[in-house]
């Protein structure tokens, strides 16, 4: 990170945001990726899998936190979303053929991928609302529907999408959904527009609205079987959520460092900013909240390793609520300490805030996780589910 990532952040940002080539990968980032790969710093996630580095969730946590200190670092080590989640899906639920065709090149960093779940016309925080249809037709499935916020689909290296839709609308509520692999170049896959986040296009990664119009793919592309989509989603989103939280803590830590550097180097009214008003309190609160979030994240990771993702779902939900809100508070204090510079592109603070604000919605909004936590707490006490 110190030798290759931080010194090249500005250059990578410029390469990714060239006015005429905004959706082109950064040559500098690609070179750093090859260096990381050659040194074995690659695919550090994937616990309990022959494909990963052999690390548990607890062991991976501090490494993921370090990656989270930079917008570009997760990709350097082939540990960036949504590829990590999609690779986990293929490792756990993919057929031998699917693994060979899609998992291997993803693990090698040769291609990228997207995950299509959220829809513009339904309240997708309740996955049972999803209306995209995946209908069997002979030895194929035909897909029709609209998806948006398909992150990663703007990248020219994105070669596959994992799409969630309904294969049987008459089945029990949680057995209607399925997941299927859709090659990006399949006829009928139509990228309608990119969706900026508070003005940031996140190129070349991007977040896209995609329409599926009579998209036909082989029946062998279905994952695990019809009606297993909800099951796959729960298995996929658990690790994804805690990875987001680990990275979020890393970014909060970096923003706190920026705040400390700023207030100990700037003078106003004859004194350092650190000697003014409530600055010390802001620093102290930030440190306390970061440590609290880190400990809860490590507890969740430990629970995932020892009792499994399903049994740890209350801790995963807790940290998914706690970490983004904590980081937003820390970043806001850092912005305030930087004054006008804090909302400019001269520092990472504005983009960090925009990026992390999405995490109170992505992979399930706070309200859904709080509902889960509350229901599980009632269950522990032997109370009826509300």
Image (tube, grey):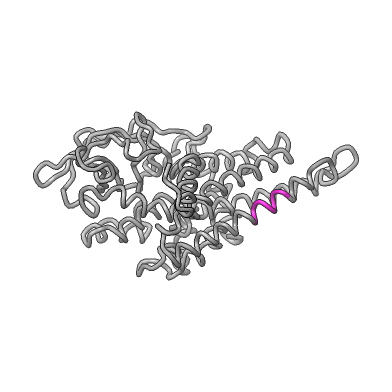
Residue farthest toward the left in the current orientation of the protein = 138
Does 81 sit left or right of 173 as displayed?
Answer: right
Does 162 sit left or right of 291 as displayed?
Answer: left
Judged by its main secondary structure, the magenta piece is: helix
Residue 67 appears anywhere in the view: yes
Does 326 sit left or right of 206 as displayed?
Answer: right
Where in the figure is residue 297, as x and y percent of width and height? 55, 57
Q: Is residue 277 magenta?
A: no
Q: Residue at horizontal 26%, vertical 50%?
A: 228
188 or 305, nearer to the observer:
305
307 or 72, nearer to the observer:
307
Residue farthest toward the top in the current orientation of the protein = 121
Does 347 sit left or right of 204 as displayed?
Answer: right
Residue 182 appears anywhere in the view: no
Q: Quadrant of residue 102?
A: bottom left
Where in the figure is residue 13, as x and y percent of width and height? 54, 45
Q: Quadrant of residue 295?
A: bottom right
Q: Residue at horizontal 63%, vertical 55%?
A: 292
**Which image quarter is the C terminus in?**
top left
Where in the figure is residue 70, as x and y percent of width and height? 56, 52
Where in the figure is residue 210, as x and y percent of width and height? 32, 35
User: Magenta segment range?
Assistant: 285-291
Q: Is residue 98 above or below residue 192?
A: below
Total tally of numbered discs in the picture:
0
3 or 241, nearer to the observer:
241
Q: Is residue 267 above or below residue 56?
A: above
**Which image quarter is the N terminus in?**
bottom right
Q: Quadrant of residue 275?
A: top right
Q: Residue at horizontal 45%, vertical 53%?
A: 382
């Amino acid at each position: 990170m110190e030798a290759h990532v931080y010194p090249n952040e500005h250059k990578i940002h410029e390469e990714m945001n060239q006015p005429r080539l905004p959706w082109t990968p950064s040559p500098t980032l690609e070179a750093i990726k090859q260096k990381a790969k050659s040194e074995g710093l690659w695919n550090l996630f994937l616990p309990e899998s022959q494909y990963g580095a052999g690390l548990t969730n607890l062991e991976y946590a501090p490494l993921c936190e370090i990656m989270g200190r930079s917008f570009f670092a997760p990709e350097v080590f082939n540990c960036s979303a949504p590829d990590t989640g999609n690779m986990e899906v293929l490792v756990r639920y993919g057929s031998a053929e699917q693994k060979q065709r899609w998992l291997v090149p993803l693990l090698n960093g040769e291609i990228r991928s997207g995950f299509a779940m959220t829809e513009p016309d339904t309240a997708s925080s309740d996955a049972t609302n999803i209306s995209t249809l995946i209908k069997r037709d002979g030895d194929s499935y035909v897909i029709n529907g609209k998806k948006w916020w398909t992150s990663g689909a703007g990248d020219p290296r994105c070669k596959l999408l994992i799409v969630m839709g309904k294969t049987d609308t008459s089945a029990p509520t949680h057995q209607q959904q399925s997941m299927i692999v859709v090659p990006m170049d399949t006829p009928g896959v139509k990228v309608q527009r990119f969706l900026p986040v508070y003005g940031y296009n996140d190129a070349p990664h991007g977040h896209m609205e995609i329409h599926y119009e009579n998209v036909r793919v082989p029946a062998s592309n279905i994952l695990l079987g019809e009606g297993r989509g909800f099951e796959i989603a729960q298995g996929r989103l658990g690790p994804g959520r805690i990875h987001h939280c680990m990275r979020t803590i890393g970014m909060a830590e970096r923003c706190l460092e920026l705040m400390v550097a700023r207030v100990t180097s700037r003078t106003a009214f004859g004194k350092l900013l650190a000697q003014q008003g409530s600055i010390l309190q802001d620093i102290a609160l930030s440190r306390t909240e970061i440590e609290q979030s880190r400990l809860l994240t490590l507890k969740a990771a430990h629970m995932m390793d020892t009792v499994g993702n399903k049994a740890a779902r209350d801790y995963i939900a807790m940290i998914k609520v706690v970490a983004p809100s904590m980081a937003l508070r820390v970043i806001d204090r850092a912005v305030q300490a930087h004054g006008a510079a804090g909302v400019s592109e001269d520092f990472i603070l504005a983009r960090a805030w925009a990026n992390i604000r999405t995490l109170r919605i992505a992979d399930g909004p706070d309200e859904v996780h709080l509902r889960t936590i509350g229901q599980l707490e009632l269950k522990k006490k032997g109370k009826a589910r509300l």
